[in-house]
Image: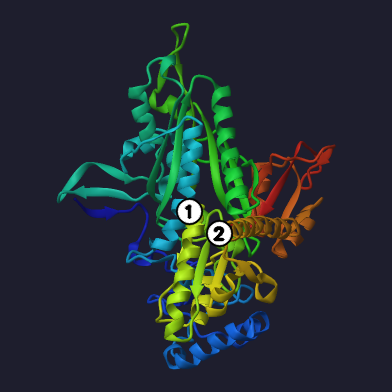
Amino acid sequence: MVSALRLPSLHLTNLFSSSPCISRRSSAILRRHHRLRPPPTLTAGFSAQSAASSPPETDDKVVEIEKNRASQDRGNRERVITPRSQDFNAWYLDVISNAELADYGPVRGTMVIRPYGYAIWEAIQDYLNVKFKETGHSNMYFPQFIPYSFIEKEASHVEGFSPELALVTIGGGKELEEKLVVRPTSETIVNHMFTQWIHSYRDLPLLVNQWANVTRWEMRTKPFVRTLEFLWQEGHTAHATPEEAEKEAMQMIDIYTKFAYEHTAIPVIAGRKSKVETFAGASRTYTIEAMMGDKRALQAGTSHNLGQNFSLAFGTQFTDENGQRQHVWQTSWAISTRFVGGIIMTHGDDTGLMLPPRIAPIQVVIVPIWKKADEKTGVLSAALSAKEVLQKSGIRVKLDDSDQRTPGWKFNFWEMKGIPLRIEIGPRDVSSGSVVISRRDVPGKQGKVFGISMEPSILEAYVKDKLDEIQSALLERATSFRDSNIVDVSSYEELKEAISMGKWARGPWSASDADELKVKEETGATIRCFPFEQPQGNKTCFMTGNPAQEVALFAKSY
């Protein structure tokens, strides 16, 4: 049992107190919704929208039910989501709270991931696990306690991570002979074990991955995006040649890129990190950078070519085919729960969460509507049949058959939770053998279609088609937003202007590390990456006027 946790150069009493990301006001916003209340009754605007897009019979039912339960819902009107344009951070915290994704843990900087938020993480795991295994990787697990001497073995690694380390110095009531690091990343302990497992070229390549928690004592936190403890997968591989290691690092960043585009509808830009931004202990770092709704960049995933830096430090060697002893070449790569934050900030709107269908824990919600007791059985039977049809076809469906809430409450609630499609079924729909279907990404009348047949093959085909449409539409929308907020610059003044407007700046770069740090100090922007896709032709560095081989992307980031 660990009885004490001591941290280098940190004062617990001041921890996170000056954080601009979780200010006192923002903290209060999230805690105000700690006990999540039901959404308010339909707002005037939403009611007008419903009236314009619903048949009279359905609208009358909703109005009547709302009258009967007005007193129940009147006290719940305080549940609101701050408009994104008014305060993006408050909006983000409101969405996390109201959509029941996470809550603050009792230790500052930690969070409790609630079932709905964890279900999104599970969807990420499901996709990536398949891809990892298809490419020959096996899952395993390494201990979370690492001897401090391991961290010290690779000089740049310890220098990069020391400020974030959490150290255990007492165990079982006694001072430990050697302090332990609570896992910030696993390169060191992985190399310790690889040294015991790798002896010959026949043992290579060694390809493993682990799903684990990580502790980094962050001073500025934001739920999902940056927390003291977070969840991730970290892959670690060892190879006989530098070419094999480079191929592996590129393969994994490609898997992350395809995942972002095809599964989460986030149009990331893949590229190489600058030397200043390279992972501590890596020779090269590759990244996928995503533009959030406030135009800040989010580093959504990384793949590192570690070269022989760790194998030299730990003596991780093998005997090659010629009988010579060689150090292995290595990679590591990771995606974490910050990707959940990326999904929220890329697609969410003033109504709340908006989930791409392929990542959504629930793709379709069915809301039955009845007015009289003798209508309930028929409506619920039809709703259950629709649910079974869709489930059998592999669609993730939720039937909200509770009778404690009004249909309007349910519409509002599931829209806020980001469910891509809603199916409404009332008595007249049962009589006509049809349903009403609404899209989350297209509000109002334009997103609602009446008279969709309940005939299984028709309903299944229509729903699948609409889910595909939503997935494509969200990617299109995010790509358009990204492209309209990237400015090509040819001078430092143009870069400063672009950054001051909240945009990304793209321009030729061959300047020094000192110049890069100057840009960061004066504008708050960093080089997010040198994109893999580069324009052709001669280039001139906008900072120095010297020839440049590549353009770089600059932006403020999380």
Question: Whole-percent x and y of residue 169?
Answer: 24, 48
Q: Quadrant of the C terminus?
A: bottom right
Residue 348 location in percent, x, y? 59, 66
Left/right of residue 523 with respect to residue 548 in the rendered view: left
Amino acid under label 2?
Pro
Q: Secondary structure at mark 2?
A: helix
Give coordinates of residue 35: x percent, y percent.
37, 77
Q: Picture quarter containing residue 251?
A: top right
Residue wearing tag 2? 456
Q: Amino acid at mark 1?
A: Lys
Q: Is residue 398 among the parts visible in the rendering? A: yes
Report the disc number at residue 392. 1
Choose between 426 and 77: the one closer to the eye. 426
- Looking at this view, name the residue that lies furthest to the front: 431
Residue in the picture at 35% in, 61% down: 11
Q: In the picture shown, does residue 190 fall above or below 508?
A: above
